[in-house]
Image (spheres, coloured by chain):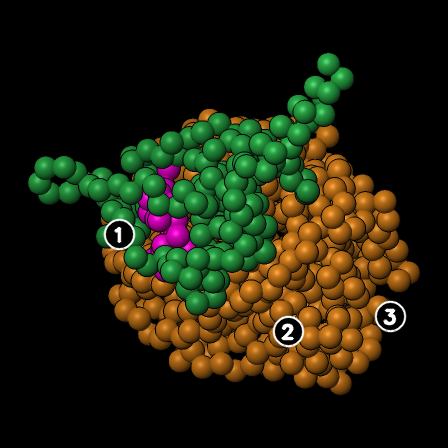
Amino acid sequence: MKRLPPIAAALVFLSACEREDREFRPSPVAGEGDAAIALSSIAPGPGGTEMRADTGKAYEENAYHLSEGKRLFTWFNCKGCHANGGGGSGPALMDDRWIYGGEFQNIVQSIGEGRPNGMPSFRGKIPDELIMQIAGYVRSMGRHVPMDAAPGRNDDLMPRPSEHRLPSSPAVTGGTVPPSGQAPQ
Amino acid sequence: MPTKDTAATRYSGLSEITTDNVKDLRVAFTFSTGVNKGHEGAPLVVGGSMFIISPYPNIVYALDLTRPGAPLKWQYNPKPDASSQGVACCDVVNRGPTYSDGRLFFTTLDAHVVALDAETGREAWNVKLGEINRGETMTMAPLVVKDKVIVGISGGEYGVRGWIQALDAADGKSLWKAYSTGPDRDVKIGAEFKPFYEQDRGQDLGVATWPPNAWEIGGGTVWGFTTYDPELDLIFHGTANPGPWNPNQRPGDNKWTNTVFARDPDTGEARWAYQWNPHDLHDWDGINENILVDVEWQGKTRKALVHPDRNGLVYLLDRTTGEVLSANFYHPVNTHQGVDLKTGRIKINAGKYPHENEVIRDVCPTAPGAKDWSPSSFSHQTGLLYIPHNNLCMDWESTEANYIAGTPYVGAEVRMHAGPGGHRGELSAWDVVAGKEVWTIKERFPVWGGTLATAGGLIFYGNMEGWFKAADARTGEVLWQFKTSSGIIGQPTTYRGPDGKQYVAILSGVGGWAGSIVSGDLDPRDGTAALGFVNAMADLKDVTTKGGTLYAFALP
């Protein structure tokens, strides 16, 4: 019986090591421009639009990438417009509405290419790997990532429950009108 | 002009609508602007036309008041760059057009100034004065002084170096430009510059009071209402907050941010300046209105300037010298103890200093201040100032900000909440000489629009729930109110129509910094949204929706 606690501890310790792999160096082939992703939920003919739900898994299920994404979200001033996900001059990122699509690849493209109503294009300013980490973190604000990978408590003022405690808000296809649709014609 | 006169009193001599008959006021006509963002503009009436400007995309509409229902006469769409929406800190507002000599002048969000022929809506000239890629936008209402169009730049949350500029009303050519930071020649400080206090004297203070080169991205933007005294031949304007908000990154007084300047309108040369808040700690832009009134002060008539600042004080200044005659609290304040009248310097409470990475709780007033841009009015009938303001406090943490051109340069985590009493806004009548409140109306939300005083003994204002109200200027009793379609953050106007009747007009359409939770559809679960304002406005979505509509009222 005396030996059990050390064995249990060793088991816990070793299984914790298995939790995830960290990619400290980005994959040399990782690029943001290659995945095709539809911005619309309608497409002519049978089958509808193709959704690639698995893109970004490597980032979304990895606590290291998500916590890096959280740091970079502040570092590159994303926070100045989107706050801690509630939005400001930019739209909210923690809710279920996505003007330009809420899939990982949509968000990567929004950051890289910009969007016409005020989102700057960061292509060439932020390395692709870092854009993916930020996109993963953005997905964590609507809890589209596994709970055990999402960041925990902030180091700073806590504006809302931490990412791993936020309820999951699956994206809805309706419910918002993009700013470009609001202006009188 | 939106301010009624160059003294910005917003006092109208019209007296057909009085305290007795205001209860009969009813809608005469309405008009949809078709835009869903915050409507901070003033309807402007010249002759038989009314001019209104929408928030981005800054469409100008002219309505024909001579015909029943005031139909559309012309409209003009400047088609501003859509990306400019991304560098407007606090909703994509515009504070109104200005008229002079047959022409209409206004600014656009992508930093153009445009002149139109008021009769036809044809463009006379259109000049670009800023670069949105550096975060430069324009939101202010221009002021025309002696054939010069006075305009300034916005973008204090993006590290923009602020300036004020005079354009030739005939062709838009720049006549002079004065920066708010940097060496004296850039600020237009020369031999004629005589500030009243020691704190504002010295050479190149716009450089010396900053860490090296920080003044180049130091803010001090100019986006409030400019006033003009034709007798002294001086214009008065404020400068906004320094960048970033985090004060630990910019030790020094950070001149000339949060300052009021008196300048020669012909040359731009500064005559005096007074810094309201040296080394700003809480985003206290000094751009609130500087209303020009003459007061009896200790037995003498003084040419004064009244200024309710974000820091919670109403200042009474001698506008010939910049001397502070008095500074009294109109909002609960725990961050400072008012102004030392000998030195002119504000006395900061060290206990609330926002050291980096330390959460300071219950700081009053907040980042938008005791009062933001919302213009007060001054009634020559009662001698009182009518101040629309907030009642808010906040938690604040200074964090390190990175300067990346064209992105926010803030460095603060802010979360606001209601001030003492639980209400979040007030309309207060203020005795400028005695320096005390006479009456006040408490409002559930901040009073984010302007006020209007009339010779009929009335004060008009709107609240963010959408009620447009008329109060007795002497007692503060609300005598009439009408529920408009959206929350009100605009500036009321009154005018005599071509039919001889008195009208009152207001733009309804919630938004602005306070209302961006609705106009920008923000998520109230994040208290730091909209730079911390959302925490105090979480229930606004329950009471109003967005949408811009003009309302005009008249007696039957």
The disc at residue A120 is none
Q: CA distance from mark 3 to mark 1?
A: 64 Å
Quarter holding residue B358: top right
Say what amino acid the circle numbered 1 marks. Ala
The disc at residue B216 is 2
Could you say which is closer to the camera, residue B9 or residue B546? Answer: B546
Say what amino acid the circle numbered 3 marks. Glu
Residue B174 makes an appearance in the image:
yes
Q: Secondary structure at mark 3?
A: helix
Say what amino acid the circle numbered 2 marks. Glu
> Is residue B110 covered in magenta?
no
- Give the residue at mark 3: B198
Query: In x, y percent, where is residue B497?
Result: 37, 49
The hue used for chain B is orange
Label 2 crowd (10 A; few <14 / some 14-19 / many >=20): some
The disc at residue A36 is 1
